[in-house]
Image: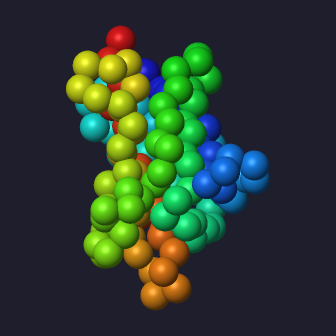
């Protein structure tokens, strides 16, 4: 079954949207979803909100935890095993010091 997902990356204070996109993929365990269009670089402190068409939501308060800012790659995660919606975003650090989303993995349990 198909799952529509709206992804929104906002500033650390939540007042401005930095980048957003819609994508779709299959429901199930650890499904890779495409990241469409031009991928924008975001600061590590960005908030991430992901919503499905039928009302499920996952939030990441800080895309890159401060303790992991020195890493080259980081998995930003929302949700835990057993939750209806679990989302993981692989972020790679750019030369500018900003981060770029490389992969979006979604797990649904219904």
Q: Residue at x 43, y 21 (%)?
A: 1
Q: Residue at x 54, y 46 (%)?
A: 48
Q: Nearer the viewer, residue 109 or 16?
A: 16
Q: How many marks?
A: 0
Q: Residue 109 location in percent, x, y?
A: 32, 18
- Write down the quadrant of residue 54 in the picture: top right
Q: Nearer the viewer, residue 63 or 40?
A: 63
- The furthest residue to the top: 110
- Write down the quadrant of residue 68 in the picture: bottom left
Left/right placement of residue 100 relative to residue 22 reads left
- Report whether residue 48 is seen: yes
- Report whether residue 21 is seen: no
Q: Is residue 55 above or below residue 14?
A: above
Q: Nearer the viewer, residue 99 or 11?
A: 11
Q: Residue 25 location in percent, x, y?
A: 45, 37
Q: Is residue 3 above or below residue 92?
A: above
Q: Residue at x 48, y 31 (%)?
A: 58
Q: Residue 99 location in percent, x, y?
A: 48, 70
Q: Residue 85 location in percent, x, y?
A: 40, 26
Q: Is residue 64 above or below residue 84?
A: below
User: Is the image coloured rainbow, by chain, by secondary structure, or in one colour?
Assistant: rainbow
- Quadrant where the C terminus sits is top left
Q: Residue at x 75, y 53 (%)?
A: 16
- The furthest residue to the right: 16
Q: Is residue 44 above or below residue 98?
A: above
């Amino acid at each position: 079954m198909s799952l529509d997902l709206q992804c929104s990356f906002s500033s650390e204070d939540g007042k401005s949207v930095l980048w957003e996109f819609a994508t779709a993929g299959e429901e199930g365990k650890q499904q890779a979803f495409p990241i469409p269009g031009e991928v924008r670089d975001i600061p590590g402190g960005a908030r991430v909100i992901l919503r499905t068409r039928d009302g499920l939501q996952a939030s990441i308060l800080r895309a890159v935890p401060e303790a992991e800012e020195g890493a080259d790659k980081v998995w930003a995660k929302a949700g835990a095993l057993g939750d209806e919606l679990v989302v993981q975003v692989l972020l790679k650090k750019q030369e500018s010091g900003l981060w770029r989303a490389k992969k979006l993995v979604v797990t649904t349990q219904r």
